[in-house]
Image (cartoon, helix red, strand yellow):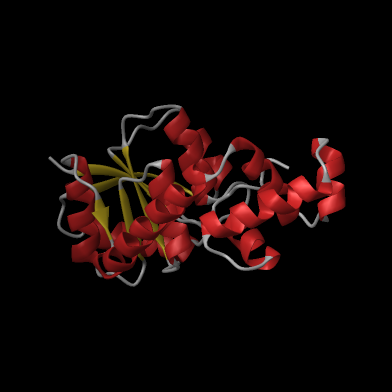
Amino acid sequence: MSAKVVIVDDHSMVREGLKQLLELEGDVQVIGEASDGLECLKLLETTVPQVLLLDINMPNMNGLEVLERLKEENVDFKIIILTVHDEIEFLLKAVDIGINGYLLKESDSSELKKAIFHVINGETYIQPSMIPLLNSKMVQRDHEKVKIDLLTKRELEVLKLLSVGLYNKEIGKKLEISERTVKNHISSIFKKIEVTDRTQAAVFAIKNNLINVF
């Protein structure tokens, strides 16, 4: 019995090449193809694969947006991101959303098949070359979370406001506290998140998605 796969990529030659490689030995069957995110979602209304191979860079909804939508819908099939992106941020985002596999397009067909059957069997398959960096980034993020947890609710408010460029006086006015109190909060924030100036504090806030609420 062959694994049923859907390929989503905006390049028709990539889709055709993958289809030929995967179906060569008869253990994988490509049951559908889509060229962008919206077409993918439409296709999945009538076609249910065991594994969805999903590119990131696509028009009309990118791969990560498709992944997010499908995870919200609690789909039964597995999803492997197949991409040229070896930047750790893309992998981290995919892991956060809940990916089953993440593989680079430079991988050979045997590794892709290995990934497909791994995820069908309930395992996660991450590009081996990216695992050490992923692990170190996860440890780093845990450390950053500890720092964030040290901040009081008021300190978080101050950090978010200074990170979007507000001066102490403006922060005080917005939060209805004195400028002196703002200075005290900032001093405490710097100590807790281990930074020495406002720019470093802003970078910390951006990296940890603290200011997208504003």
Q: Is residue 41 above or below residue 135?
A: above
Let me know if residue 8 appears in the view.
Answer: no
In this rendering, position of residue 148 left or right of residue 120: right
Residue located 63% across and 43% down the image: 156
Q: Nearer the viewer, residue 138 or 114?
A: 138
In this rendering, position of residue 65 left or right of residue 20: right
Residue located 29% across and 69% down the image: 107
Q: Nearer the viewer, residue 27 or 126?
A: 126
Instruction: Return the x and y of residue 28 as percentages of the image width and height.
Output: 21, 49
**Count of marks, rendered view:** 0
In this rendering, position of residue 106 left or right of residue 61: left
Residue located 38% across and 49% down the image: 95
Residue located 23% across and 50% down the image: 116
Instruction: Return the x and y of residue 185 as percentages of the image width and height.
Output: 67, 49
Q: Is residue 208 above or below residue 127?
A: above
Q: Quadrant of the C terminus?
A: top right
Instruction: Return the x and y of residue 6 as percentages of the image width and height.
Output: 36, 45
Q: Nearer the viewer, residue 7 or 214?
A: 214
In this rendering, position of residue 122 left or right of residue 68: left
Q: Quadrant of the N terminus?
A: top left
Let me know if residue 155 appears in the view.
Answer: yes
Q: Residue furthest left?
A: 1
- The part of the image, by quadrant, that contains residue 65 is top right
- The part of the image, by quadrant, that contains residue 127 is bottom left
Q: Is residue 185 above or below residue 103?
A: above
Q: Nearer the viewer, residue 70 or 9?
A: 70
Instruction: Return the x and y of residue 21 as percentages of the image width and height.
Output: 26, 63
